[in-house]
Amino acid sequence: MRGSEKTYKIITFGCQMNEHDSENIGGMLEAAGYAEADSPDVADVVVMNTCSVREHADKRFFGMLGQFKKRKEEDPDFIMCVCGCMPQQPRIIREIREHFAWTDIVFGTQTIGDFPELLRKRIETGKKQFSIVDNSQEIPEEQGAKRLYKFKALINITYGCNNFCTYCIVPYTRGREKSRTIEDVVKEARALADDGVVEVMLLGQNVNSFRDPNGGSFADLIREINDIPGIRRIRFMTSHPKDISPELIACYRDCDKLCKQIHLPVQSGSDRILKRMNRHYDRERYLGVVKDLRRVCPDIAISTDIIVGFPGETEEDFRDTLSLVDQVGYDSAFTFIYSKREGTPAAMFPDQVPEDVKHARLIELNEHINAGALRKNQTYVGKTYEVLCEGRSTKNDGAWAGRTDDFKLVNFQGGRDVTGRMVDVEITSAKTFSLDGRLV
Ligand code: 5AD
Ligand code: SF4
């Protein structure tokens, strides 16, 4: 932090899309002359980048926002900003206007590009600035994100979602799906590679339905990025199982930089529930995709998202989910208790599952997932893997942390700082969520 400069702090909730939006917002603030503060308590500008997917999200959001009221009363020059998925919901905007009217700047997921102008106007006029639109805008080309890491980067390739899974609020908060052009994405990836980035993560709610407005598929995009000198690893998320194409699966065979890893949310193992979720695939089709992936890439690591307690989920439906988990053998999973999101179809379904049943199912599911993950991780012990070191381990003192090609988190011992470099690490022991090792 530099002397008398104005400072900012961004508080980020939710998915990697939000994380990347925060990197872009950080870039805008730095371009406007702000430096990052150590804590929101001392920053001149605080930005809350919000998520509305999780349970009790509203309550938590307003609770945290409320904590800044006193600061605002004491210091009228302090600027409080709210963005992300929360303010995309009209009832949230109403609540902010009625009970949190001291908030200075509010913008949405599709108006991030307006932020520098909103900030300038707020400072010049002292007036509150609200900018929320619903999908009426062209996607502005991004520039100058303040990246969390020097050597790996997130790249948006699609925005929004057209799938309307019946439990999900994202299509309402992030609007209709739009793809960037292959040319723009490749240009961004090249510039990142020139800047020292070796790993790119391509982001979208459903990257598989990426379609260049001028023609070209997601597989075409991967092939082009695979040709960029300097880039050594390509990852993507999230994939919708219904849209995995044979061309994409072939990329795992042909593209040496495409990491042996896929996040493939299944949500449920019951055909009846999948139908009610509006997922457009059944269990057999999902297992078919897994089989096809493993045929071209036998070692591929597969992770997933699963919801328990979706309305109408019976014990038998839940058993179907457990058996699917065992059948696939996931490397890891994000598991969720179904939570009603106002405005989504499933919130109106009459047969909601009692809370205690949902909790018990989550515990049982996690036991299955964790046992499978540990079993898989134990197969790594004694072998050596290439790891991209991300810096100090948060777990054990003196250790470094990084990820393998197939996204395993490795904490390893080794004297010198190898942050940002690919190093060989021998795995010495396995845990449920990570591996331990030593630098070779
Ligand atoms: N309740 C529980 N989990 C949800 N997810 C999305 N909406 C809900 C909801 N209403 C989960 C899904 C999705 C992940 C990002 O969040 O599993 O894949
Ligand atoms: Fe939500 Fe379904 Fe779209 Fe994923 S695909 S963002 S779960 S509506």
Image (cartoon, rainbow, N blue to C red):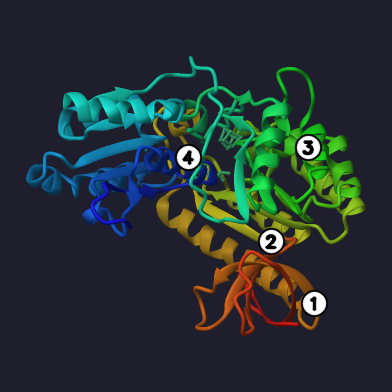
Closest to the camera, between mark 3 and mark 2, is 2
CA neighbours of label 4 inside 10 A, class few (<14), some (14 to 19), many (20+): many
Lower position in the chain sequence, tag 1 or tag 3: 3
Which secondary structure, mark 1? Answer: strand
Inter-mark Cα distance, 1 to 3: 31 Å
Q: Nearer the viewer, residue 199 or 31?
A: 31
Q: Mark 2 = which residue?
A: 407
Kind of residue sitting beneath label 3 = Ile
Question: Does label 2 or label 1 sit earlier along the sequence?
Answer: 1
Task: Tell me which amino acid carries mark 2.
Answer: Phe
Which tag, 4 or 2, sits closer to the chain's start? 4
Residue 140 visible in the snapshot: yes
Name the residue tied to disc 3. Answer: 244
Task: Name the kind of residue labelled 1 in the image.
Answer: Thr
Q: Earlier in the sequence, mark 3 or mark 2?
A: 3
Q: Which residue is mark 4?
A: 24
Frontmost of labels 3 and 4 is 4
Other residues around mark 3 within 10 Å, as few (<14) / some (14–19) / many (≥20): many
Instruction: Give the answer, above or below, for where 86 lies relative to 67.
Output: above
Quadrant in which residue 154 is drawn: top right
Per the image, the residue denoted by label 1 is 384
Q: Residue at 41% x, 39% y: name it.
A: 31
Q: Are marks 4 and 1 in contact (CB under 8 Å)?
A: no
Q: CA distance from mark 4 to mark 2?
A: 24 Å
